[in-house]
Amino acid sequence: MSAVTKRDLNQRTSDVLAQAAEIGEVIVTERGEPRWRVSAYRGQDGALARAERQGRYTAPSSTPVPWPEVVGGPRYESAGVDALLEEVKGDH
């Protein structure tokens, strides 16, 4: 995301609009504070496309992690579980 000043928008409007078309969005600042957002029109996006563009959604990976060959996690012995519980309890 890029930022330009209000004066730059006034003086170089076509450059700022070209920048918005290229990168998607430009923030316009006034006295160093972000005040406005200029974004390129993309037609009628779906809800997921808008959320992804706004950074609120990430599409799933095209190469998912494979399933583990062994079902379940590590195996615990009774003595190990007891020791772990004692460690978690501590000296309260």
Image (cartoon, grey):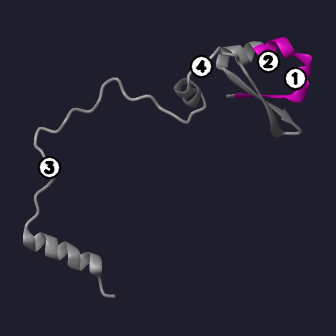
Residue at the image position 14 percent from the left and 49 percent from the top: 72
Q: Which residue is mark 1?
A: 8
Q: Secondary structure at mark 3?
A: loop
Magenta residues, as a range? 2-17
* Spatial separation of the CA atoms under disc 3 and disc 4: 42 Å
* Spatial separation of the CA atoms under disc 4 and disc 1: 29 Å
* Spatial separation of the CA atoms under disc 3 and disc 1: 60 Å
Residue at the image position 73 percent from the left and 16 percent from the top: 19
- Residue 9: x, y in percent? 86, 22
- Residue 70: x, y in percent? 10, 43
Q: Secondary structure at mark 2?
A: helix
Say which label, 4 or 1, has the lower sequence index.
1
- Residue 81: x, y in percent? 15, 71
Q: Which residue is mark 2?
A: 16
Q: Which residue is mark 4?
A: 45
4 or 2: mark nearer the eye: 4
